[in-house]
Image (cartoon, rainbow, N blue to C red):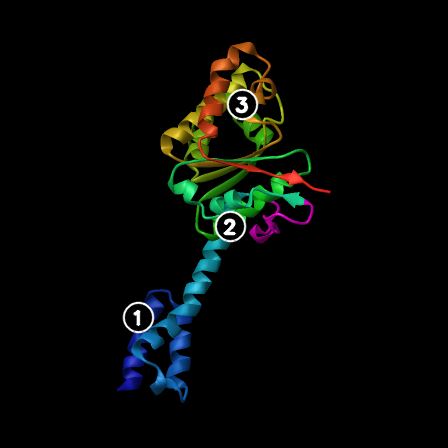
Amino acid sequence: MLKKTLNSINEMLDVLGLPLVSQRLNEIVKSPDFSNYSPMQLILEILQQQYLDTLNKRFEVNLRLSSLINKSALADNLKTGNGRNYNDSTVDQVLTFSFVENRQNVGVYGITDAGKSYFLAACCIEACRQNFRCKFVDYSDLLDELTILQREDLTRYRKRIKYYSRIQLLFIDDFAINRYPEETVNILYHLIKMRTDHGTSTMFSCQYSPDEWGKHISDDSSCYGKLDGIRRRLTNGYTVLIRKTE
């Protein structure tokens, strides 16, 4: 009777695509400790390995789709020490990713070589682990891509900017590192406004404080209104300041 029931369960698990559950169940049934398991213990034991395997595969897919290059960054390193000083309580809050649920953004500021890109990479890895849909992009690469598409293929441009606007958590490294003409600033404004409308969150790194963005994003005076709109929308959440120490 037990063998027949076990065969039926294995057939169902095979159809459901749960091979690790089936494997662990058979191991336990054949072990001398089988009778010692309570029903809840048995369920936990046979599901645990499949559950962990599924989480790991999901994380690997999320990380691959994020396009992140530095996959060695660790969230555990995002704390004061080793020549870096953080506002640690804010970092702890950011790493809960509650800001995504609250439709907020995070700006990471510091001088050159302060560790801003590492911070973003570590957060991207952790967000992928928590099953957020992420994309990691360089500021200049992002704007160059969208500007060229708008000039050469309007249909593809619209699809691409719609894609970027709907990414649950967009990471933009080196924000405001280059100046752009009005044409590109309009694209950036459009993207940030669309993300605000969709309620998606952005994490970005930047060398300059928001009150300096006007002269670093563009030196075209006709862009003032757009620049102010970008600043107001992106700075609605948390600020992480990284300082290098001696």
Label 3 – label 1 distance at C-alpha: 52 Å
* Residue on which the image places disc 2: 126
* Residue on which the image places disc 3: 147
Crowding at label 2, few (<14), some or many (≥20) Cα neighbours within 10 Å? Answer: many
Q: First in sequence: mark 3 or mark 1?
A: 1
* Contact (Cβ within 8 Å) of mark 3 with mark 1: no
Q: Quadrant of the N terminus?
A: bottom left
Residue 33 drawn above or below residue 113: below
Residue 164 drawn above or below residue 147: below
Mark number displayed over residue 12:
1
Label 3 – label 2 distance at C-alpha: 31 Å
Crowding at label 3, few (<14), some or many (≥20) Cα neighbours within 10 Å? Answer: some
Mark number displayed over residue 37:
none
Overall secondary structure of the magenta section: loop
Label 2 – label 1 distance at C-alpha: 34 Å
* Residue closer to the observer: 10 or 81: 81
Q: Is residue 25 visible?
A: yes
Instruction: Please name the amino acid that badge 1 sits on.
Output: Met
Expressed as whole percent of the image width and height from the top left, the position of residue 51 reads 41, 64
> Which residue range is magenta in the image?
69-83
Q: Describe the element under mark 3 as helix, strand or loop.
A: helix
* Residue closer to the observer: 121 or 83: 83
> Is 175 left, or right, of 62 in this rendering?
right
Expressed as whole percent of the image width and height from the top left, the position of residue 4 reads 28, 83
Q: Quadrant of the C terminus?
A: top right
Expressed as whole percent of the image width and height from the top left, the position of residue 7 reads 31, 79
Q: Residue furthest left?
A: 1
Point 55% across, 10% down: residue: 221
Q: Describe the element under mark 1 as helix, strand or loop.
A: helix
Point 48% across, 59% down: residue: 56
Instruction: Please name the amino acid that badge 2 sits on.
Output: Glu
Expressed as whole percent of the image width and height from the top left, the position of residue 100 reads 42, 41
